[in-house]
Image (cartoon, rainbow, N blue to C red):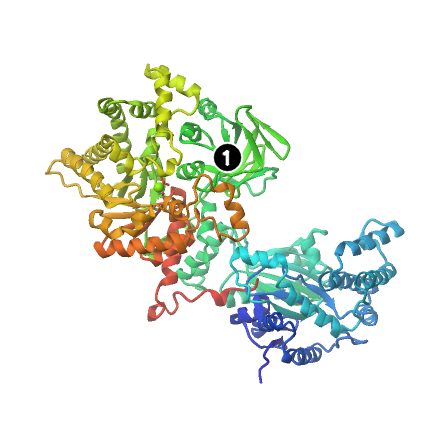
Amino acid sequence: MPNAFVYYFGAGHADGGRADKALLGGKGANLAEMTRIGIPVPPGFTISTEACRAFLREKKHPKALRGEVEAAVRRLEKDTGKKLGGTEHPLLVSVRSGGAVSMPGMMDTILNLGLNDTTVEALARASGEPRFAYDSYRRFIQMYSDVVLGVPQKDFEALLEGRKIIRDVEADTALEWEDLKALVVEYKILVARETGQKFPENPTDQLWGAIEAVFRSWNTDRAVAYRRLNNIPDDLGTAVSVVSMVYGNMGGDSGTGVAFTRNPSTGEKKIFGEFLINAQGEDVVAGIRTPLLIREMERALPTAYKELLQVQATLERHYREMQDIEFTVEKGRLYLLQTRIGKRAAAAAVKVAVDMVDEALITREEAVLRVDPQQLEQLLHRRLDPAAETVVLSTGLPASPGAASGQVVFSPDVAHERNAKGDAVILIRSETSPDDFHGMVAARAIVTSRGGMTSHAAVVARGMGKCCVVGAHDLEVDESRGIAIAHGRVIREGDWVTVDGTTGRILLGKVATVEPELSDQFHILMGWADAARTMKVRTNADTPADAQKAREFGAEGIGLCRTEHMFFEGDRIISMREMILAVTEQERRAALAKLLPMQRADFKGIFKAMDGLPVTIRLLDPPLHEFLPRSEEDSRHLAQILHIDEAQILHAVERHRENNPMLGLRGCRLGITYPEITQMQAQAIFEAALEAMQEGIDVQVEVMIPLVGNVKEFSRQEEVIRDMAERVLGSDTKLPYLVGTMIELPRAALTARAIAEEAEFFSFGTNDLTQTTLGISRDDAGTFLPYYIENGILPDDPFQVLDREGVGRLIEIATREGRSARPRLKIGVCGEHGGDPRSVEFFQNIGLDYVSCSPFRVPVARLAAAHAALRTKPKSSPSDSEGIRPLTPAVAGD
Ligand code: PEP
Ligand code: MG
């Protein structure tokens, strides 16, 4: 009868295998699998997660467990020719925890379990090295006492230090075996004093103590917190692997190492790793001795090296995936201790995936699924030279990736001036506003001490593909004094810093960066991704240059052109302010007339860049006060330029002040209140389209009305737009254009049927929809959102990863209702979530037509859309049988 809880592996046989990850943990499943396929693995057994669950539930071991463990130990004794507690050839084991999902906070490995005052002598005799035996023994007592008996490591370290002082030596290795033997006595006295009990001498007692400690470690505070944070269910439990010890520290013909089957940075198909002669596994990781490159093993341990090359190739072929392995050579014999999927940098991920298709190991679809979309962004921006040394000044949220060095400035005007002189500047502000736009354009990177991932700085920077860190709370910014303080260090204007937007770090000085290079393999992989996906990917772009960049990255149109950004640049803001300050409609129209040619030129540039692809242009959205001067100085300056009284400006600022501007006079409410704004914008759009068409450009315009909550709002604005289209285009011109709306208010989502009767397309503005559904301000969330996420109140930042239960539900309702009124209604997403892989999956699942995101996220979204399509593709069709094999079998340990 098969065992209920214990899975044995050894002598070429294994219960279970790689498919049993849930039961045996990643480690246990792969030890079994390796044994099965003839890889040399020291024999052992794995106690299943089922036993752990039963133990935690019942507060005692399940009945059958004791007998099964005893039987497995007997079998292990037979296979190794050693005996637990034996005086001649003692069996020593390692005990490790390992769940289906890797989890820090769980119990570490205990090595050399089975040592006691008798077996240590036998080990000394068998190895001929008493020092090795006693060193193993004292380490075992220390480790076991720490994790099983709760006596802190530092107490043992103090005794070790004391012994070194007595002997007047610096290094542990200078202690003789007699010293280590004496230390063992001291260690045991310490344990007895601290626990009131003797250190367990009986190896069977030791083993049960360790098993129980592993089970209990499932519920340590750290493990529980980690599960909360990563959405790992509490009821998975951990497995326990008990493996017979092999030693890499048995002399010059022994050693231990770690290796990847391919280079994890570049993907080159060549074993990559390091090893140490005459050492234990922990010595490699601890960094006390400098390991040798794996190549050198060829000279030092030629036979074992040859075998290692074969084994790693077998593992790769078997798992059809790059592996990360741990091995030990004991007196010339190679043993594998672990294998798991190797983590790799983005460039390596792409190369390995494409190479493996060439090697006929995996299919194209699998290759696409092997590359993490989120990781792809690393490849698209300038990045820090990985070899550079760095000093971190401050850390915030990685709002927009890339890396840039420059001299610190605290004012957008200074940024503008210095950039004009050719200086590289980094703009540091407590937060940014539309007023700072010219400074943001001028800066190489932007840093704010406040704000979240969808704050003004973050959205604008991402749109520009500019490196940006926001919410660096450990940075005190004092713009008026022109300084920032980070952990007591003062940063002044002119100081050099480097901003790493990929990790959120602000570094001291000028750190070297390297250009991104898109490999041929990158383009090949993206081609496969495009073939696999069904959802289109567009971009959010406001300028012809961004549109062009996005097109190079594979954008299939513009999903959102925020026209307000066109008003911030250079002198345009003056005309915009003139328009806002206008008292009569006539004055307003005069100011708008100055803006018209500028908008028209921008639109034409964008139509040209997007020749043949759809361009969604959104009408003016933000509240007017955002365009008005913020400081008295600025007001004075404006009064001078416009030859008006400063009081008039202050009055206008006062008039436009709102308590909740995000819920105030913005979006379509602006165009409804001042229809001449919409008229001007529509005129610019259609005139630009006409001019572009006359130059042979294939123009596909989609005019989008923002912040609609009520179908009547839509109809009013639509009428203005269509009237203008008719006026500009006349009846002969054939310009197919659509008028649609953003769905970014809950009411719009809930009344989508009525809106779709009128609107020709929907685009979910998930930034505002998140803000209004959750009632969390996009700009003020920084004060409490990090706490919410850290403490598991919210699983993720809802402005980055779509809140499926709330916002997602509204999107589903609106999609269903919208299509019930207009079955072919085109529906997309243009909020930040359009570039987030997990959100993209949701959009695919509910059948949206496209997502739109900032230019640098376009490849990420293309790959994410391919992943989503492949994961939801029905698996029944015969042609798929090779295609989308689930990845789980290839997932190695943790
Ligand atoms: C949105 O709200 O999701 C959106 C795209 O518009 P904005 O971010 O400009 O408000
Ligand atoms: Mg919006």
628 relative to 859, above or below: above
Image point (39%, 60%), residue name? 364
Residue 594 x/y as whole percent:
26, 24
Query: Residue 796 appears at what percent x and percent y?
Result: 48, 51
Mark 1, secondary structure of its residue = strand
Q: Indicate the position of residue 675 as horizontal and vertical percent values.
A: 23, 32
User: Where, quadrant-wise, is the N terminus in this rendering?
Assistant: bottom right
Q: Is residue 874 visible?
A: yes
Q: Amino acid at mark 1?
A: Thr
Residue 172 left/right relative to 833: right
Residue nearer the viewer, 798 or 875: 798
Specify the farthest residue to the bottom.
Answer: 1
Residue 530 or residue 186, whichever sits in front: 186
Whether residue 537 is visible: no
Judge from the rendering whether residue 808 lies leftward or rightward of residue 419; answer left or right.
Answer: left
Which residue is situated farthest in the right direction here? 166
User: Residue 815's quadrant in the figure?
Assistant: bottom left
The residue drawn where x is 38% and y is 42% is 855
- Label 1 neighbour load within 10 Å: few <14, some 14-19, many 20+: many
Q: How many marks?
A: 1
The x and y percentages for residue 54 are 60, 73
| Front residue (pair 688, 651) | 651
- Quadrant where the C terminus sits is bottom right
- Per the image, the residue denoted by label 1 is 448
Q: On screen, 806 above or below 76?
A: above
- Which of the 4 image quarters holds residue 50? bottom right
For ligand 2, the image quadrant comes to top left
